[in-house]
Image (spheres, grey):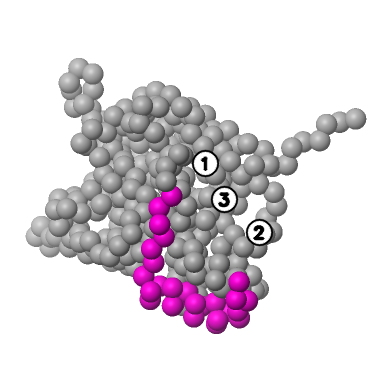
Amino acid sequence: MKLGLQVRQHNALTTARYEYSETQLDVFFYLLSQLRKGQPGSVYEISVPAMSELTGKQYNYKRLREATKEMGSRCFELETTDELGQKVFRQLWLFKRVDYVIGSGRLRVEFTEPAIPFLFDLQANFTSFELQAALLLTSKHAKRVYTLCSQWKDKGETPKFGLIEFKHMLGLVDAKGNEEYSEVSMFKRKVLDISVKQINELTDLNIGYRLLKRGRSFESLLFTVGKQAVAMPIPFDLVPDAAPSPVGMAPHQVENAGRLLAQLSITTPELVATILANAAHVAACNKFAHDLKTGKHAKAHSLSGLLLTILGLKKPTNGPLFDAATKKQA
């Protein structure tokens, strides 16, 4: 197995109570991959085209700005030890500012001072996970479950989590204590089963879960966690001044991608060769094939055009990167 870029996240953030959307988690995980030891005061940059190449997703730039604006007002509530050595629940906001560089598809982020220890002072208290795996997941709950299970991948299973506490972690309980998916059957179908399916199909982990009863009621759950071989390497170098990694892909994944291209009448030899030589393109093709089976692209006008747009080989039709510069008045 060729490993992709490993991301490290403080365990307090892994188990924190917060709610981010799928797009917001993509931004957050990509930012984690950019952090550099010894540079906590730096301004960090996101390349939206690079993030799109990793995820196989096209980001609507207006919605992306709305997503980061909302991230600025959403807090992480985490359990930690304060300066006096006391156990506290700390409410933390991550961003000091976010700048969108007009016409470039890049945004720059600066973190708040209280967030810096949880981003840089990890020591041995961190969760590591595969960046590309986390980005490929399309369920926001699957992304959170993946990072949580990654914390315990060497142990074989997670600790038991009370159901209410677990829902708090995922942002499924509001300030008044109202639960989303209060019915266990709905919680299983909308959160747990989707998370397990996506994680087992798209990541380096193979997980399951057990719901545990106390009396007649389900009170807690735990996840079983194993490792599995996948081929999802980072196809280009994300780390400045580091040597690029070789690309490795499982033969069956390349074959499946080739079958999809033929099915969609994408047969130009040079184009096919370009797609099948790029690990991110192969992963995106396999995900596209899965989405086809589940009816996600049923309303697409041109499936071949949609796939090529997702792969970044055809121009999207949603306008320039961010907003065009305002013309000066005469």
Q: Which residue is mark 3?
A: 49
Whole-number angstrom distance, CA of label 1 to CA of label 2 = 19 Å
Residue at image coords 21%, 26%: 81
Residue at image coords 46%, 56%: 235
Q: Which residue is mark 1?
A: 46
Residue lying furthest left: 215
Q: Mark 2 or 3, which is nearer the eye?
A: 3
Marks 1 & 3, CB-CB < 8 Å contact: no
Q: Mark 1 falls on what kind of element?
A: strand
Badge 3 amino acid: Pro
Q: Total of numbered circles in the picture?
A: 3
Residue lying furthest right: 330
Whole-number angstrom distance, CA of label 1 to CA of label 3 = 9 Å
Pointer 2: residues within 10 angstroms few (<14), some, or many (20+)?
A: some
Say which label, 1 or 2, has the lower sequence index. 1
Q: Which mark is residue 316?
A: 2
Q: Nearer the viewer, residue 179 or 103?
A: 103
Residue 48 lies left or right of residue 251; in this view the side is right
